């Protein structure tokens, strides 16, 4: 789910804040899924959580850059 939210945050970075919100949700979901007490947690497989965090950070960064570029022109 974190990977899906991160990918959606990258795809929707141009929608005035939606990409930032989805990116934050992706990071939160990935951090919650990586906790050791999470049911179904496999400590050897962290790739989906790491990729979810990275895509969430990228979505937040793209959204912030877009907002700083677009707001002066509104």
Image (tube, rainbow, N blue to C red):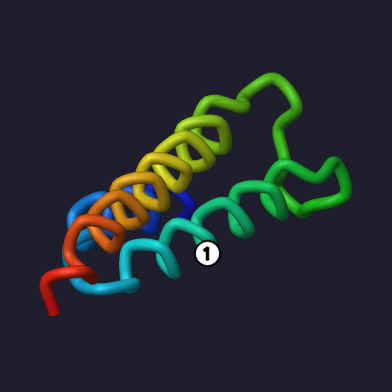
51 over 35 or under it: above or below: above
Residue nearest the observer in this picture, 1 or 15: 15
- Say which residue appears at 28% left-offset and 63% top-offset: 67
Residue 50 in the image: state x and y as whole percent: 55, 31
> In the shown orientation, is residue 36 left or right of residue 40?
right
Give the residue at the far left of this rendering.
73
Left or right, residue 48 beside residue 74: right
Q: Is residue 36 left or right of residue 57?
A: right
Q: Residue at x 30, y 58 (%)?
A: 68
The image shows residue 70, relative to residue 58, as above or below, that is below
Asked whether 72 or 11 is in front, the reply is: 72
Q: Position of residue 32 (x, y in %)?
A: 72, 54
Please tell me whether mark 1 sits on a helix, a strand or a loop.
helix
Q: Residue at x 53, y 40 (%)?
A: 53
Q: Determine the residue positioned at 62% across, 27% down.
A: 46
Nearest to the observer: residue 47 or residue 74: 74
- The residue under label 1 is 25
> Residue lying farthest right?
37
Of all residues shown, which one is farthest toward the front?
Answer: 72
Q: Is residue 6 left or right of residue 38?
A: left
Q: Quadrant of the N terminus?
A: bottom left
Depicted 2 relative to depicted 15: above or below: above
Quarter holding residue 36: top right
The residue most toward the top is: 44
């Amino acid at each position: 789910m974190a990977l899906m939210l991160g990918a959606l945050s990258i795809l929707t970075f141009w929608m005035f804040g939606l990409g930032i919100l989805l990116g934050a949700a992706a990071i939160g979901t990935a951090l919650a899924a990586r906790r050791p007490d999470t049911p179904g947690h496999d400590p050897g497989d962290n790739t989906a959580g790491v990729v979810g965090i990275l895509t969430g950070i990228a979505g937040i960064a793209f959204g912030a850059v877009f907002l700083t570029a677009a707001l002066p022109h509104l």
